[in-house]
Amino acid sequence: MIEQGLTRRVKRFLLLVVVPAVMLGVNVPPAWAWISELRHQQLINSQEYKEQFGKWDVVDLPDDQKVNAIHAAVLPTGRILLIAGSGNKEDMFNAGTFKSLVYDPATGRSRVIPTPDDMFCAGHTFLGNGNLLIAGGTQRYERLDGAVVNAAGGVTVKNEDPDAAPRTFPAGTEFLSPEGLVYRAGHAFTVQPANKVATRRGATVTASETIVFAEAVAPGPQYVAVGPKQYSVGGLTPVEGQNIYALGQAMTMEKQDYQGIEETYEFNPFTETYERVGDMFFKRWYPTLTPLANGSVIAVSGLDGTGEILNGQNEIYDPATRRWTERKDLTQYFPTYPALFQTAREDQLFYSGANAGYGSSELGRVPGMWNLENNIFTPIPGMRDPDLLETAGSAWVGPVQDQRVAVVGGGGVGESPRSSARIDTIDLKSPNPTWTPGPMLPEGTRYPNLTTLPDDSLLISNGSRDYRGKGNSNNHNARLYRPATNTLDYAADPQVGRNYHSASMLLPDGRVMTVGSDPLFDDAAGTIPGTFEQRIEIYTPPYLFRGPQPTVGEAPTTLALGRTAEVPTPDAARITSARLMAPMASTHVTDVGQRSIALDMTKTDTGVSVTLPEDRTLAPAGRYMLFLVDDRGVPSQARWVEVPEAGPAAAS
């Protein structure tokens, strides 16, 4: 019916446009293109089309409010935090210009937020109190092969004195080699006293260690050095110099990767300010922060302060003390931005294999289960395209109680042009989890954005076939994955192409917002440097075109584990499900905190009664969006609900 109506209108356009164009000798192809585009716009804006496939709308912010959205998070106020830091712009980094933006999708208003450090490529996740924990970022931009003129490398500064106070050295501190060559520390560093442990025979002393990036004081190959070497540290007295010294492996003029920082902040969504907390033990760039069931957070992987990937050193953040603790008992190597999920077993994390790439091409690339009690990692092979997991997306599919994770798309290691169209899922409730093949995407897809919706479907949007969209390879398509049937439905095509440095978020009104994209080139030939995509695009799913949303009254603001609460609604007769949706915090198409929690539900005289699961692994403390979904699959506007730390608190 819709096609017939459009055909009649197009025939009228032919008479009005094309025939006069021919008579006047005007070029017909542009006229045809105009008609084709007009017909396309009429189609995608028709009610029938939107009810079946949904609709995308582009939002273009004022120039002074635009940021390179490297990180994106839905705050428990309903506003969106977009973090750029230096935004992958070295001139901004050198100028110390770091940006964040708070955007309100309900009003369209936005404002730039003071940003104290370069959080570009940090890790982040939400805490139980609603704050967003942000750790790491950029200490130094990369230097590519051929651009390095001063030999440089990492040196390990050691202190063998257990009785000395911590000693801070400024940037520019000199390291002198046995040959008389001088190198300078690029940044300030602190040396802790040695560790002294009493024994029956006296005491054992273990030297403290701090890794520092040092660069030759002058350009030229004469500063290239092969290690290991011992360096003396400038600014010390002769006595201090007997205990504090540096060891270096090599000083080279090879490519120098990005370097991380240890700074950590909590972003308070209610004051919209960054609050400085304790530094990490290790500098990290491209780390993953995974929230654990007990409310703490584990920081995993990343490039350190010398541009080397951390060799499995992990640490845990305690929100109560706002401090990090190094966990030498949990040494485990992963590539950068590994997708690690807290499972229904408190001592088990699941690694989907998805990652952002830096690190060994061999180590840490196989999915598996990580036991935090004994630090044993058990691989789970069997996924299709196992060598195409870099830049893949992964997420829980369906309610988290189902314990099913999907891995979507991905590509080869590094700048490989290869990409996968695979959707594979795994059931972690099984005693022996195995991979189940799902439907294929229409194209190979690196950087897919995955967004869980209140109707239990998974929106898969954007991405590119090649590395960072090379060769104009952006995929302007979207699909809705239905985990209950393991099928894929067509969704409306997004207008904006997105690849590297893009993110998606479920909004409290049931729509989905996408941001970012950082293509390597702006042309197919690869001759024009890429431009960061600063437009926002919002997807309205088909369910919001099927009639009015269910109405929810004043729902409880707190819902404790295992407790029941009354949610008033005049639409109770048609409500079929209730979901708590964790607010998303995404970067590099990775969000390990995203989850949907199914609530047990019964009808009441005034609404519905909902009950939260008792297990904190399924419903960790935090702020959630409460959606009621009706028999047409239409969700309500969300109400924000707090799940407190496990304890005697009741629903209120």
Image (spheres, helix red, strand yellow):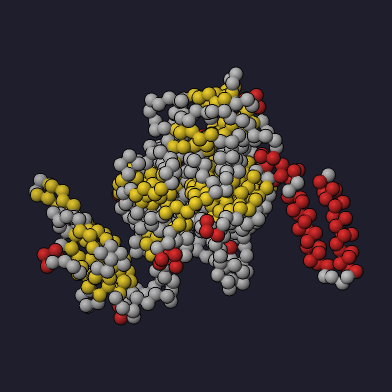
- Residue 384, compared with residue 343, is above or below; it is below
Image point 32% across, 44% down: which residue? 322
Residue 434 placed where, x, y %?
Answer: 53, 43
Foreground of the two, 226 or 453: 453
Q: Residue 62, percent across and down?
A: 56, 57
* Image location (x, y in percent) of residue 150: 34, 76
Towards the viewer: 449 or 644: 644
Q: Residue at x 37, y 59 (%)?
A: 260
User: Residue at the location (33% across, 48% down)?
Assistant: 277
Residue occupying the point 38% across, 28% down? 647
Measured as percent of width and height from the top left, residue 381 is found at 50, 49
Comparing 14 with 244, the one in front is 14
Of the 4 image quadrants, the one containing the N terminus is top right
Question: Would residue 603 appear left or right of 624 to someone viewing this image?
Answer: right
- Residue 256 can be seen in this image: yes
- Residue 218 position by quadrant: bottom left
Residue 384 visible from this viewpoint: no
